[in-house]
Image: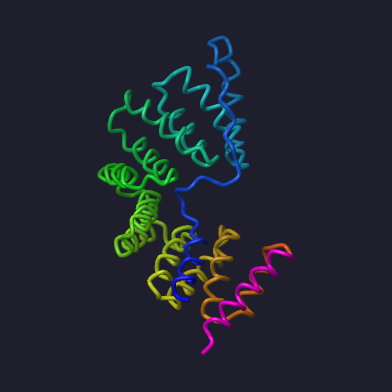
């Protein structure tokens, strides 16, 4: 039972470095021609708005064209890579960043983004190497400590991962993404009460996502609190999905009964 519960919890891990599922990046257009650069400010505004609206494929198309025109453009490289990563294309992000690092060797922001892309591609050893290198000069970036925690979790180093999450929270107190990942890290070590308390805090944050609340729902069910877990499921999910979840929660409680 313990093994299956751990598997169920692990399935729920939603961590900051992964790309968003179900999205495919559009193929970037050919390089922006010199005569088209009068349009660049307007296209850039569209690209930035696309990122805000989570249309990462559209944003990647613009930044990819700019980067292809000028591979020395560091901003374009970073924006192109991050939007590819969010659109579920971490390998494309890694390729772009490798090219950018030829022009900007050792650049901490490029290394940080490449580390996140490696993590998104489930290539965790080079992810950790890049993140640790970037942290030598970017010690105030909470996203790097958060990404380090995710990477260390995947490398089966939970104590080190928890320490990284604590460093991220010291820089970004109450951050729901970090609290979510730290809670799941703690839950997998068997500290369910502590994990639930962290997720309750995360769920109250204005930027808390559905996944934070559903992770809380899962952990509550693992503790046997099926009623509250069910209320959280119904609040965010469709009727069919919530009933499926509640049936699963009841099975967890029944399996745990003496």
Q: How many labels does the image show?
A: 0
In the rendered image, residue 95, in percent from the top left (x then y), is placed at 41, 30
| Residue at far bottom of view | 258
97 and 70: which is toward the camera: 97
The image shows residue 189, relative to residue 67, as above or below, that is below
The image shows residue 92, relative to residue 34, as above or below, that is below
Residue displayed at 53% across by 22% down: 65
Position of 76 with respect to 115 (left or right) is: right
193 and 224: which is toward the camera: 224
| Residue at far left of view | 136
Span colored in magenta = 239-258
In the rendered image, residue 216, in percent from the top left (x then y), is placed at 54, 70
The image shows residue 42, relative to residue 176, as above or below, that is above
Residue 52 shown in magenta: no
Residue displayed at 40% across by 39% down: 113
69 and 186: which is toward the camera: 186
In the rendered image, residue 147, in percent from the top left (x then y), is placed at 39, 51
Residue displayed at 42% across by 41% down: 117
In the rendered image, residue 23, in percent from the top left (x then y), is placed at 60, 41
- Dominant secondary structure, magenta: helix
Position of 70 with respect to 53 (left or right) is: left
| Residue at far right of view | 239
């Amino acid at each position: 039972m313990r093994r299956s519960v751990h598997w169920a919890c692990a399935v729920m891990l939603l961590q900051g470095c992964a790309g968003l599922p179900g999205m495919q990046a559009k193929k970037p257009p050919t390089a922006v021609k010199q005569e088209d650069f009068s349009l660049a400010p307007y296209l850039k505004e569209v690209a930035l708005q696309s990122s805000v609206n989570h249309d990462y494929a559209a944003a990647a198309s613009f930044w990819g064209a700019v980067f292809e025109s000028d591979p020395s453009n560091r901003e374009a490289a970073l924006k192109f890579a991050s939007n590819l990563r969010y659109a579920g294309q971490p390998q494309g992000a890694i390729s772009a960043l490798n090219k950018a690092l030829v022009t900007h060797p050792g650049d901490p922001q490029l290394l940080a983004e490449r580390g996140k892309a490696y993590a998104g591609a489930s290539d965790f050893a080079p992810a950790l190497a890049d993140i640790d290198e970037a942290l030598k000069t970017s010690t105030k970036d909470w996203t790097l400590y958060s990404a380090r925690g995710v990477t260390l979790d995947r490398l089966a180093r939970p104590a080190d991962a928890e320490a990284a999450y604590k460093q991220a929270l010291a820089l970004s107190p109450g951050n729901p993404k970090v609290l979510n990942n730290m809670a799941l890290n703690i839950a997998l070590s068997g500290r369910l009460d502590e994990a639930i308390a962290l997720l309750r805090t995360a769920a109250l944050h204005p930027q808390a996502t559905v996944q934070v609340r559903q992770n809380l729902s899962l952990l509550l069910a693992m503790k046997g609190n099926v009623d509250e877990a069910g209320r959280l499921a119904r609040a965010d999910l469709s009727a069919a999905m919530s009933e499926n979840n509640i049936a699963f929660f009841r099975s967890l409680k029944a399996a745990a009964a003496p």
